[in-house]
């Protein structure tokens, strides 16, 4: 007789016995027990793959951090150089503008002393009106300035020795020729307002 297998959805008929399968004595023990005596098999491939991925991420992160540091330093250095070049450019532009202003603005002429101004006025008068070249046929000597610095005189002597005195008056800060005489009289002193002791 063949053993009956119990199916949960079926009930035995009256007079029948319910049978439970009996173990086969020829079946291997290894087939009846789970692998590795109750412990599940470990997936070594997944573990190795996870470790490789973690190492790769770590190495990639380290190299990424180093690249970021170097890039930041290069950027800072470049910004510093750009800033320095911009400052140099501004300084060069300021120097160029200053140089252009110096070229276009007239340089101030140094102020001439009273003696230099009177010498120039005497030379101009003699050369323009009389036609005498000062220094060739005529010499100017003994410059004298009045106490109030409003009158001046020069001795004018020719090469032959004869001479006279040229008188100048300061009018509006400009020395102007007034007359020439060998001997000055009281009329001329009154007319031009010359100091008595001059």
Image (cartoon, rainbow, N blue to C red):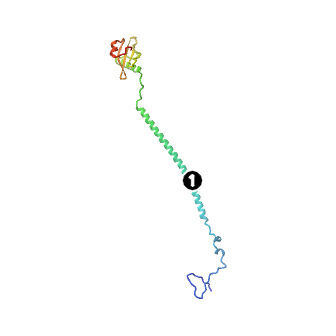
Q: Does residue 137 appear anywhere in the picture?
A: no
Q: Is residue 174 left or right of residue 12?
A: left
- Splitting the image into 4 quarters, where does residue 100 fall? top left
Q: Is residue 53 left or right of residue 97?
A: right
On the image, the x and y values in percent for residue 123 come to 38, 19
Instruction: Single out the residue that lies furthest toward the bottom.
Output: 15
Identify the residue at image location x=44%, y=36%. 96
Residue beneath label 1, please?
63
Identify the residue at image location x=50%, y=45%. 79
On the image, the x and y values in percent for residue 115 come to 41, 19
Identify the residue at image location x=55%, y=53%. 65
Q: Nearer the viewer, residue 63 or 187?
A: 187
On the image, the x and y values in percent for residue 73 come to 54, 47
Question: Element type at marker 1?
Answer: helix
User: Crowding at label 1, few (<14), some or many (≥20) Cα neighbours within 10 Å?
Assistant: few
On the image, the x and y values in percent for residue 186 come to 34, 12
- Splitting the image into 4 quarters, where does residue 146 fall? top left
- Splitting the image into 4 quarters, where does residue 45 fall? bottom right
Q: Is residue 31 left or right of residue 189?
A: right
């Amino acid at each position: 007789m063949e053993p009956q297998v119990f199916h949960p959805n079926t009930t035995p008929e009256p007079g029948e016995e319910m049978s439970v399968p009996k173990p086969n004595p020829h079946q291997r023990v290894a087939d009846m027990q789970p692998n590795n005596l109750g412990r599940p098999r470990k997936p070594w491939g997944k573990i190795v793959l996870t470790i490789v991925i973690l190492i790769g991420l770590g190495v990639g992160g380290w190299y990424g951090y180093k690249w970021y540091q170097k890039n930041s330093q290069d950027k800072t250095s470049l910004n510093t150089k750009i800033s320095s070049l911009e400052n140099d450019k501004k300084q060069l532009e300021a120097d160029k503008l200053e140089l252009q202003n110096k070229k276009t603005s007239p340089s101030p002429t140094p102020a001439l002393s009273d003696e230099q101004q009177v010498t120039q006025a005497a030379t101009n008068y003699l050369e323009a009106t009389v036609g005498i070249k000062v220094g060739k046929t005529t010499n100017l000597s003994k410059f004298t300035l009045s106490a109030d610095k409003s009158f001046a005189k020069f001795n004018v002597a020719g090469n032959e020795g004869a001479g006279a005195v040229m008188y100048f008056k300061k009018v509006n800060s400009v020395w102007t020729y007034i007359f020439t005489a060998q001997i000055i009289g009281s009329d001329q002193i009154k007319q031009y307002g010359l100091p008595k002791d001059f």
